[in-house]
Amino acid sequence: MSKVKDTEYLFLSTYIRARENSLLGQKRLEQMAEAADFDEAARVLTECGFPDLSGATDGQLEEAFQARRAAFLAEFEKLCPEKDIVTAYRLKYDYHNAKVLVKGEGSPRDRERLLSACGRVPPKVLAEAYASDSWQDVPETLAEAIREARTTLARTSNPQLSDMGLDRAYFAEMLAVTGALSTDFYTGYVRLSIDVANLRSAVRCIRGHMDEGLLRTAVIAGGNVSPDRVCRAYAEGVTEVFHDRALAKCAELGQQAVDGAPLAAFERMCDNVLTEYLTAAKQTPFGPAVAVAYLASLEAEITAARMVLLGKRSGLGPETLRERLRESYV
């Protein structure tokens, strides 16, 4: 198969640059945080192409976010020269749905509303495969991961362990899919995401005085820091293990959290490191990196909008909401 050239992304890159101004962005997020109430904050989203969500229930909010994500993905898939850029994005929702199904065996009605339609496999197809244990319509790697997670939960009654297995399978498949693309930008983002996930696991395990064996179970292979090296954080400290320039500040805040500081600053920095990686695409006039960064920023936009709106509904003040905001791509 011939390699896709960056010039084949000219149209999509132009399309994305035109749409970037309609992303929520830092200025609008702060405007939402400063809004007098939920309804006023929700109306800010209309500037970004959302319907008027003032007065919306939590369920209606989720429906609007799902619809925005699904509509964009369907359009993006038609325009993207490499469909696997979208496939890699959709994997997150396949494995989200897998977790919902595995942990929700006792409450099928509740789990149905939690399933996302943004994965590769339609929720109904995946749920029917799960119920019948017939997997011909499900990608083999995903099916195997679900079966293994189901067995783990049945054996241990520990949903955390089944989630860990699905996370490992998710990142392994992400690396496989992104490794076949014409750019290593997406693979670099996945590897950094694995490092961040492992750093978070190390901080939580050490802070919670958990056995090192739990971290060895949780750690994910494929990052820039090897699993064995991650587990040495127990003996050497978080800052010594995660000393790479991209992660140094995260590790410093992580060590502070291990020593008893609140987790909020550490968690925020972990997310900001991933956003900082994506901003390199701003210097690229066209190519697959532009598409990868836009997809990730779209997801971050939805996460931030949800956080602010639910915070407003809960009565959180502007200062508290601003403290929880992550850096924005735009």
Image: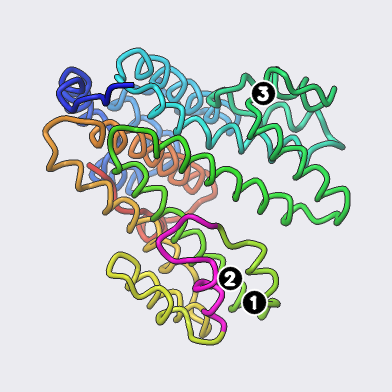
Label placed on residue 208: 1
Instruction: Identify the mark nearer the N-term, 2 or 3.
Output: 3
Mark 1 closeness class: few <14, some 14–19, many ≥20 residues within 10 Å: few
* Label 3 SS: loop
What kind of residue is marked 2? Arg
For the residue pair 214 and 17, the one nearer the viewer reads as: 214
Task: Check whether the beta carbons of the residues at disc 1 and disc 2 lie within 8 A of each other.
Answer: yes
Any magenta on residue 265? no
Residue pointed to by mark 2: 204
Residue at 74 percent across and 32 percent down: it is 111
Residue pointed to by mark 3: 138
What kind of residue is marked 1? Gly
Which residue occupies the extreme front position in the image? 1
* Label 2 SS: helix
Residue 110 found in image quarter: top right
How far apart, in angstroms, are the residues tagged by discs 1 and 2?
6 Å
Instruction: Identify the mark nearer the N-term, 3 or 1.
Output: 3
Residue 120 lies left or right of residue 325; in this view the side is: right
* Label 1 SS: loop
For the residue pair 236 and 123, the one nearer the viewer reads as: 236
Magenta residues?
A: 221-234
* Front label number (3 vs 1): 3
Residue at 37 percent across and 35 percent down: it is 40
What kind of residue is marked 3? Val
Above or below residue 146? Residue 12 is above
